[in-house]
């Protein structure tokens, strides 16, 4: 009898250990949902109204039904989104062979930052200075705004337009070359709050098409493409948030399809209240599924390898009530069921209110808070790293 009891006890201990092990492997966290309480988050924005080109905001009716420009040797009209599959598949095969021949290495967590200076205003000295300082501060990814390409896009076709387009592309490639030499990868960033609306959607695809063609034609390439589309700032959002968010999800879905088998990674910037548990946004149906905007987004991005979501978890403190960690918790929990990485963004610019930004704090204080965020979310397989908005303000911190 005693032997039987000991045997049963051992079985219970083994079963318990197995359950603990499974929980550890699955990284299960039984944290209760944390509904958002702070309405300031619904007004937070990543981009600067001062820097955005008017052509990214206003609509040009003559371009609403445009046919995209493509390199003469490649044809992939938007109507069927056909691509140069032979080239892309060959690149994919080469990448697979390299991965088999090379030892597997842990991918470093992202430490990204945005640069809003229009590309044509950047001098070589400016690029070198910004990138060198960014590297010194641990930045390994730069998100460079390409919205100003729309100023060229709307020009009359001809020699002047082609000259400006070449200048734009040459400057971008120079930036990428200088960044890559320092171990920094570069993503093309673009977006405005109205880009998911039918009259404005052409701007999104004009940019995406440009970035795709850039990577097809240039030796030095973008790592990825990033959307910063903030539809919750539209007037229509107050009366019909479900429709506005559905249009946004449709734009992301179409873009994912349009990127096709290109080598571009895809990232999307969102506020910190899109998760169902936040209690801020309605569920809606898309492609036969009714769920939150955050889950719709993850389901779409999961169909493209290497995708990420950047959460604007803007607070000037990481821990405690309403801190950056708490306002990111719901998204991190939901994201555990998906492959898409989640990156936590922090603000350092001079924006109100003071408690959402590290402006007028110190770099040492900011770094301590970043360590707390990294340490807290390190056990999450879906945690992709940190992003700081924006590089000029970041480097100005003392």
Image (cartoon, rainbow, N blue to C red):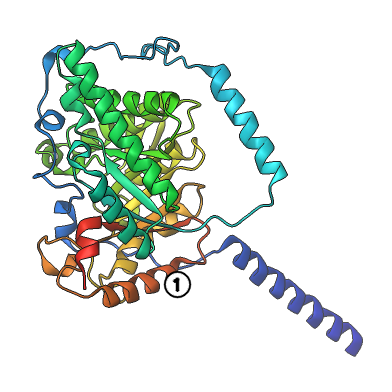
Residue 75 position, x and y percent, is 43, 11
Quadrant hosting residue 111: bottom left
Residue 39 position, x and y percent, is 15, 59
Quarter in which the N terminus is drawn: bottom right
The residue closer to the viewer here, 293 or 374, is 374
As helix, strand or loop, the secondary structure at mark 1 comes to helix
Residue at label 1? 375
Taking 153 as reference, is 15 above or below it?
A: below
Q: Residue at the location (32% across, 54% down)?
A: 131
Relative side of 191 to 69, left or right: left
Quadrant hosting residue 51: top left
Quarter in which the C terminus is drawn: bottom left
Taking 352 as reference, is 42 above or below it?
A: above
Is residue 267 among what the camera can see?
Answer: no
Quadrant hosting residue 368: bottom left
Q: Residue at the location (22% across, 38% down)?
A: 119
Residue 120 position, x and y percent, is 20, 36
Taking 153 as reference, is 226 above or below it?
A: below
Q: Residue at the location (42% across, 68% down)?
A: 374
């Amino acid at each position: 009898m005693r032997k039987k009891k000991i045997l049963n006890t051992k079985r219970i201990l083994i079963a318990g250990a197995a359950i603990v092990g499974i929980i550890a492997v699955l990284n299960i966290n039984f944290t209760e949902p944390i509904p958002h309480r702070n309405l300031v988050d619904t007004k937070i924005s990543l981009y600067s109204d001062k820097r955005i080109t008017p052509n990214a905001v206003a609509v040009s009716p003559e371009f609403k039904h445009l046919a995209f420009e493509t390199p003469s040797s490649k044809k992939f009209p938007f109507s069927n989104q056909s691509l140069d599959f032979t080239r892309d598949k060959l690149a994919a095969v080469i990448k697979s062979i390299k991965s088999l021949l090379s030892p597997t290495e842990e991918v470093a967590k992202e430490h990204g930052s945005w640069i809003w200076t229009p590309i044509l205003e950047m001098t070589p000295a400016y690029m070198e200075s910004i990138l060198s300082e960014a590297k010194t501060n641990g930045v390994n990814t730069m998100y460079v705004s390409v919205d100003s390409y729309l100023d060229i896009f709307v020009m009359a076709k001809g020699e002047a337009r082609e000259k400006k387009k070449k200048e734009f592309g040459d400057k971008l490639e120079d930036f990428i070359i200088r960044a890559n030499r320092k171990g920094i990868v570069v993503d093309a960033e673009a977006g405005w709050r109205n880009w998911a609306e039918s009259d404005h959607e052409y701007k999104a695809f004009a940019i995406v098409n440009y970035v795709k063609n850039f990577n097809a034609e240039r030796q030095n390439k973008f790592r990825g493409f990033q959307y910063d589309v903030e539809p919750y700032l539209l007037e229509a959002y107050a009366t019909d948030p479900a429709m506005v968010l559905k249009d946004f999800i449709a734009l992301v879905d179409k873009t994912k399809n349009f990127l096709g088998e290109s080598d571009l990674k895809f990232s999307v910037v969102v506020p910190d209240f899109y998760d169902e548990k936040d209690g801020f946004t309605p569920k809606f149906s898309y492609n036969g599924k009714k769920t939150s905007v955050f889950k719709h987004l993850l389901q779409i991005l999961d169909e493209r390898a290497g995708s990420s979501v950047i959460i604007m978890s803007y607070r000037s403190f990481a821990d405690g009530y309403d801190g950056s960690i708490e306002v990111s918790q719901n998204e991190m929990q939901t994201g555990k069921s998906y492959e898409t990485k989640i990156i936590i963004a922090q603000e350092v610019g001079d924006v109100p209110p003071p408690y959402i930004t590290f402006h007028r704090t110190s770099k040492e204080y900011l770094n301590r808070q970043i360590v707390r965020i990294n340490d807290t979310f390190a056990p999450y397989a879906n945690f992709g790293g940190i992003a700081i908005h924006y590089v000029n303000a970041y480097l100005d911190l003392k």
